[in-house]
Amino acid sequence: MGRKQRGRAARNARRKLPPNFETDEVRRAPHVLVFKRGVSVGNNVKELIRDMRRVMEPFTAPNLKVSRKNALKDFIAISNHFHVTHLMTFSKTQLSTYMRLIRVPRGPTLNFRIRRFTHSRDIVSALKRPQTFPKQFEHAPLLVMNGFQDDAIHIKLIATMFQNMFPSINVTNVDLSTIKRCVLLSLDPVNGLVEFRHYNIKIAPSGISRAAKKLLQGKVPDLSKFNDISDFMYREGNASESEDEGMGNDENEVILSQQLRSRGNLKSNQSAIRLTEIGPRMTLELVKIEDGLCDGEVLYHTHISKTSEEVAELRQRTIEKKRLKEQRKREQEENVKRKQENKKKKTSPENQDEDMNEESDNDDGDDEDEDEE
């Protein structure tokens, strides 16, 4: 019989990756796992989870499968191997939907209540010119924060948590062509709500006519109705796109410091930045901040305030709870170790020889009793 043929998928699965197949940039970048907690969260929350995985790409697991048997400690156990730095969980109760941000491996944990949210498909379907394409998710988004200048401890923790969830950018050597998306976080100082928005970034040359822009982008116009190309360039309605759509103000026009890959955006030329929302959209309310991984001391609570005596009592309870947990863990380890030692003693050759000798002595005693009878 000939050798069994293996498929291409099987060969690729058995192919070993080189030892250093990940770059230093990928290792240093923060990785976020997005998944649900609880038995049932509903289809709307599941779609929101898929949208948030798209936001966190490429440093996330877009096809992560979570079963009911998976506990939070399972994700923490694999976090070091897969360079996971944060966990983003979604849960739903009868009152509301909640989002939890966890810093691995020591915390803290931020608990948010989702007041309102809108899916990406609903936002994109309402746009006249949607700006969604696969290449915009090949690089991490740019994080923009507004209103986080307060010196309060909970405001600083929120800002630090979100900043550490996205890769840092070196302004001196960043490639502007890789910045395709933007995440905006805006804090309302009056009610304390955090608005989450996700935009696509488009850079287009400004100050030129639409006809010239089409030629720069490589689009071949239909010149059958014109006697000369000058008629096409100077006809009515071919004014500059910035003047037609209100893109000519100084707020969204910049001088490029480097040439971009898109046509027409040359170095030292003026270009306009256009943001198009691609979703999802969320309104977040901070509920509480916990020290550790969901089981530590409550550092801040929006709706409950405690006195210093109550805080000290809760802290003492937490310390006592951890002490008892460590004590039970040591006892379990000692019991397991003692059982393993007893099992080794029973299976050792010396014990087996002793057991055989005892059985032979018993057999001899039985034979003598039969002879006397």
Image (cartoon, rainbow, N blue to C red):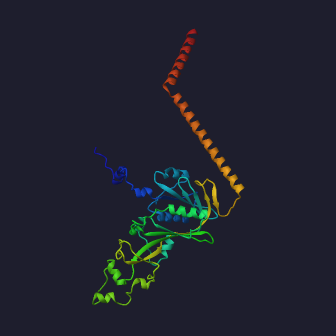
Say which of 12 and 245 sits in front: 245
Residue 42 image point, x, y percent: 56, 63
Residue at image coords 42%, 74%:
202
Q: In this view, does 315 lie to the left or right of 86?
A: right
Locate the C terminus by quadrant. top right
Q: Can residue 116 be seen in this view?
A: no
Residue 167 image point, x, y percent: 46, 62
Residue at image coords 37%, 83%:
210
When the figure is inspected, residue 52 is found, relative to residue 122, above or below; the finding is above
Residue 338 image point, x, y percent: 57, 33
Q: Is residue 270 left or right of residue 352?
A: left
Residue at image coords 54%, 34%:
340
Say which of 132 and 209 sits in front: 209
Residue at image coords 40%, 69%:
176
- Name the quadrant containing residue 174: bottom left
When the figure is inspected, residue 367 is found, relative to residue 197, above or below; the finding is above
